[in-house]
Image (cartoon, rainbow, N blue to C red):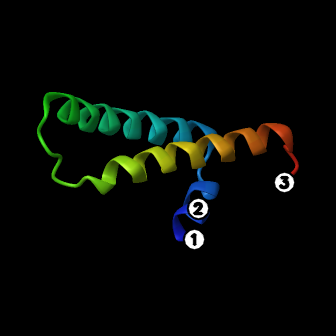
Amino acid sequence: MKAMKDLKALSEDALKARMAELRKELMKYSAQVAIGTIPKNPGAIRRGKRMIARIFTIINSRRLNPKA
């Protein structure tokens, strides 16, 4: 997975910034769904949630095992 390697190379501050950006996008898509309009890219919601989960996993693994 190329995305996972790219995320692992980032610092913790960069990961947090990326997660904040993803959350903003996800909020936009959620608002569109709540209003009743169909988002231009419905798969982006799922990808955004998964990316946020991946970032959480990387951050937590670094905290548990700082040597790696």
Q: Which mark is residue 68?
A: 3
Residue occupied by mark 2: 4
Q: What label does residue 1 carry, if any?
A: 1
- Give the residue displayed 79% in from the left and 37% down from the top: 63
Marks 1 and 3, how far apart at CA: 19 Å
Q: Secondary structure at mark 3?
A: loop
21 with respect to 6 (left or right): left
**Which quadrant, please, contains the N terminus?**
bottom right
Q: Position of residue 24 (x, y in %)?
A: 33, 33
- In the current view of this chain or complex, which residue is farthest to the front? 36
Answer above or below: position of 55 versus 23.
below
Mark 2–mark 1 contact, CB under 8 Å?
yes
Query: Nearer the N terminus, badge 1 or badge 3?
Result: 1
* Quadrant containing the C terminus in the rendered view: bottom right
Q: Residue at 77% of width from left, 45% of height from top?
A: 61
The picture places residue 39, in percent across and down from the top left corner, at: 18, 46
- Camera-near label (2 vs 3) is 2
Does 42 sit left or right of 16 as displayed? left
Apparent side of residue 37 relative to residue 22 in the rendered image (left or right):
left
Q: CA distance from mark 2 to mark 3?
A: 15 Å
25 on left or right of 47? left
